Image (cartoon, rainbow, N blue to C red):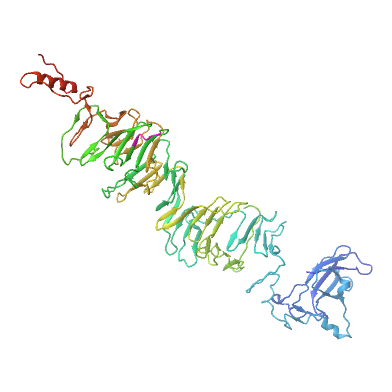
Amino acid sequence: MPIVHGRSMGPAGGTGTPPKVEITLVGLDGTVRPGWSTDADEEVTLTTRVQPAPDGTWSVNLVGNARIYSPWGDTVYRVTEGWNDDLGRPHVYYIGVPATLGPHFVGDIRTGLVPDQPIEEINGVISVEGLTGVVDLSGIYVQRAGSTMTGTLELDASTSTDVVLQAKVTGDTQQRLIVRASGAIELGSGSATADTTLYRSAANTLRTDDTFEVVASTSTTAALRTQASGDTQQRLIVDASGKHTWGSGSSAGDTTLYRSGLDELKTDDSLVVGIRLAVGTTIGSDVATVATDGTNAGLLVKATATGTAAKGVLAVETSAASKRAFDYRVTGDSVARLSVDGSAGSGSGTLIFGNGTTADVNLYRSGADTLTTDDTLTSGVAVQAPILQGATVRGGTGSAGTLTLSSTSHTTKGKVLIGSASLALDEANARIGIGTTSPANPLHVQGAAGTTSLVALDASGDTQRRLLIDASGTMTWGSGSATGDTTLYRSATDTLKTDDSMVIATRATVGNASLQNAQFHAEGAGTNQVLLAKATAAGTATVAVMAVETPTTAKRAIDFRLTGDTVARLAVDASASSSGTLTFGDGTTADTNLYRSAADTLKTDDSFHVAATFRHLGSSLGFYNAAAVAKPTVTGSRGGNAAVASFLTAMANLGLITDSTTA
């Protein structure tokens, strides 16, 4: 806009009162020209009033508008100089303002009126936008005092960083809103430089370098929604409470993840972990790791109903009989104190007992209805060995001002669209749409199917995104310096899945709507295994499919109980001789044990009953605490007492009788 300078001279014998200057778009005959009317809606421009300085100098910005035609190619204005006390005759003259910036001085651009030369009359404005007479220009020009524009507003600039729109409140020292030709929006308080931005950082990407907050009216109101082009339902909904709900895009969301209590993250559906899971500790080399401080069970597998009797509450499956299924050890042990595999008895279930450094006692099924140990079995009380066929052995029965951007001054509000409809502000419903002009929620983000960066989060200085949410609802996390490597997504109905590892720092509950005390709590209806630890390949034979580790020999590793029991019916620890110990009970009392008492020796401090065949395969045997001896031979003649004496001696040596006979 060209700058025009002038200087007003006071009247003869002037009073010293300040002059006044008025500049109006006119023709050279001193009348208004086409496009000017007393109807404000048809004004091309308002009369400009200038307040000169005390010395009479003044300056003003005047538009040299190529759309307003004058034969000189200039825009002609009438200048009236007078004085506030109206003394003297006002001085009237005309100037033709070129479109160049100047500065121009009125002495250089003045044009005179010569009544006897009417040709100069055509030096004034004779048409606007090719129209003559007083015409309605409301479709072309917006009234400075305010009007409604129904067409497209185009703001041209020479560079993308040029400001095309800015706003502030009276009294502000800085702009509250700045819009640049690139589409970037900058917002500030009005008292300092703008500090909040919103702009297009890449193709199909809207970004802010600051914080973006979504405030909803209630905790259940959706704050973020994502869907792919063509979807009839959202694939991801995040409400104001932080609850995430995933869906297929064609039906209502069916998979959730939300905070159900203090330090408690919960899903009402299934969770698939693709690589490793850690509960109460950090990710290690094992597929699933559960750690506890001992105040609660580290792993609780619980059936809430009988369900299918053939389905175990806890099932461990190996890829081969040689693969160990279960290990119990105390922290620091080099060898498991109790192991379960299929190494003995032609691949039958085998219990192997040890003391933490050596595993040398076993118990396994060697044949139909036959339980065998290759080592010594010691009973603390009586042992009964009846022969019963088909028997079953059981263990128990804003401060500062406010900036308002409005779609219209009308009471019925509409939408504010920024750019090519990439950002929509629905003023009527208080919604923001990104990628859609019809937001259905307070914040609605929409992208084409397959969009890999619908929502992106990163820190200043990052070269890669730390979090990406695509149109399917898949979340991908990364370090900020490399491509994202950790995912969380809906893999099927009611199923949330990660292809990577998941660490749960405190407790995890599966199958119960409330967080339980155990570090890892799983329960089910009994129709399927509640917990399945499965090796998909043989791997390392000495690495168990399922391992239980305690910090000391005093800490119990495994409890089996029925709902309502006060005492475990089967417990595994290292309470006897610091070896793997099985303790049996009835739910109220635990009084029967089985453990390794010494090298190659399996012992119980209680009674041991064998319902079927009891077979001793060793080379020596002792009864009633007698030292074990080899199988005795009875000698002597049966015709006299020699054979009887030999028999009595043999029985006494075995400990079966006390020989108190006399000769």
Across and down, in percent, residue 324 comes to 35, 41
Question: Residue 407, relative to residue 371: is it above or below?
Answer: below
Going by the image, does 407 lie left or right of 632? right
Residue 353, quarter of the rendered image: top left
- Is 289 or 442 nearer to us in this picture? 289
Q: Residue 268: tell me if it is visible.
A: no
Residue 635, quarter of the rendered image: top left
- Is 95 or 170 nearer to us in this picture? 95
Reply yes or no: does residue 107 show up in magenta: no
Question: Residue 528, relative to residue 23: is it above or below?
Answer: above
Going by the image, does 486 lie left or right of 91? left
Q: How many marks?
A: 0
Across and down, in percent, residue 28 comes to 83, 80
- Is 74 or 626 nearer to us in this picture? 626
Where the C terminus falls, by quadrant? top left
Across and down, in percent, residue 58 comes to 85, 66
Where the N terminus falls, by quadrant? bottom right
Magenta residues: mostly which secondary structure? loop
Q: Residue at x 23, y 23 (%)?
A: 625
Going by the image, does 618 lie left or right of 639? right
Q: Residue at x 20, y 40 (%)?
A: 369
The single residue placed furthest to the top in the displayed view is 663
Across and down, in percent, residue 327 comes to 36, 38
The single residue placed furthest to the right in the displayed view is 13
Q: Residue 61: tell me if it is visible.
A: yes
Q: Residue at x 82, y 65 (%)?
A: 51
Q: Which residues are magenta?
A: 334-338
